[in-house]
Amino acid sequence: MSAPHWVNTPLLALAANHHIPSYATAERLNVPLISVYIALYMAIVAAPFTYSLAGLITFGVLSFATICLGITLCYHRLLAHRSYVLARPLKLFLALLGCLAFQRGPIWWSACHRLHHSHVDKDGDPHSPRYSVLWSHFLWAFFTHPQLDESPEQVRRLAPDLYDDPALQFLETHYTAINVLFLALLFGVGCGFGGLKMGLSILVWGGLLRIIYGLNATWLVNSAAHLWGYRSYNTPDSSRNNWFVALLTWGEGWHNNHHAYPRLARMGLQWFELDVTYAIICCLRWLKVATQVVIKPPALPAAQAWVK
Ligand SMILES: [Zn+2]
Ligand SMILES: [Zn+2]
């Protein structure tokens, strides 16, 4: 099977498309989440007035911690795909970092991502760009999904290995409170070191802007890495290898490689495909805290689901 016909549709034509799936009705709008996202985006207005070097450094350090270590290394490659096994205390710490990226809890995130792999570019895929660029980038997140959000049993079916883990369930249940507490902590620490002005700088740059950046970097994997870039493997989907997304997401942009071999711990498969996250996995394996790292593509049939 080759890629769907619309894969070669010019980007502008896709961008002009404003289709959404039939299930995306007004009743399914996730109003609380939309309200939070709007509040977060208002932080952009405050950014120029709250800039400080300390705020910028906090932005960089926490972006790496929450997106590279939390989302890419833990949520995606460890939890959703089981590409390696990690010592439990470290696994839970990384899952906590993933929570701080404000992309929902580790169990729902993994269930949603497994749904993407098992239905990619077909009905059921939560964020296929076949509807429109905007849908695949962020609109999808504003609606409850009929195969994911109707009952906890749906999430359990998609991620039984994670659902029954009480520590992950704790993070899942309390991820909003964890984020609120962490933002309060950032503000408090900033105030402690440099007064109210520094507190606001650390909160806006290290908290709110950092979350917006992380959300959009991750969403680019769903949108840009299914629209722009080259294809090394003729997978039956629209996935692409996109160097820009790979740079922003520490290796996740080699998305065509990933759809060809979903369980592989490594996504950059050619010498020039930089994959920082895989380098970290190699370090963890060398330190003997990561084991059973899935590294050999020939042992895996291409384009198989996460379970294989
Ligand atoms: Zn994909
Ligand atoms: Zn994946």
Image (tube, rainbow, N blue to C red):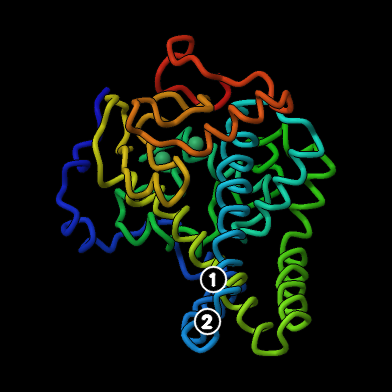
Q: Give the image quarter of residue 258.
A: top left
The quadrant the C terminus occupies is: top right
Element type where label 1 sits in the image:
helix
Q: Give the image quarter of residue 283.
A: top right
In this rendering, the answer to whether 33 lies above or below 283 is below
Please give the residue where the numbered disc 1 appears in the rendered image.
56
In the foreground, 96 or 19: 96
In this rendering, the answer to whether 105 lies above or below 190 is above
In this rendering, the answer to whether 57 lies above or below 147 is below
The quadrant the N terminus occupies is: top left
Element type where label 2 sits in the image:
loop
Q: Position of residue 225 (x, y in %)?
A: 34, 45
Quadrant holding ligand 1? top left
Q: Position of residue 286 (x, y in %)?
A: 66, 23
| Residue at point 63%, 41% (across, down) | 74
| Residue at point 33%, 37% (across, down) | 239
In the foreground, 196 or 10: 196
Q: Amino acid at mark 1?
A: Leu
| Residue at point 31%, 43% (across, down) | 242
**Dots 1 and 2: beta carbons under 8 Å?**
yes
Q: Is residue 59 left or right of residue 271?
A: right
Please give the residue where the numbered disc 2 appears in the rendered image.
51
Q: Position of residue 161 (x, y in %)?
A: 72, 31
| Residue at point 55%, 66% (across, down) | 210
The mark found on residue 33 in the picture is none
Q: Is residue 270 left or right of residue 35?
A: left
Q: Give the image quarter of residue 83.
A: top right
Q: Amino acid at mark 2?
A: Tyr
Q: Earlier in the sequence, mark 1 or mark 2?
A: 2
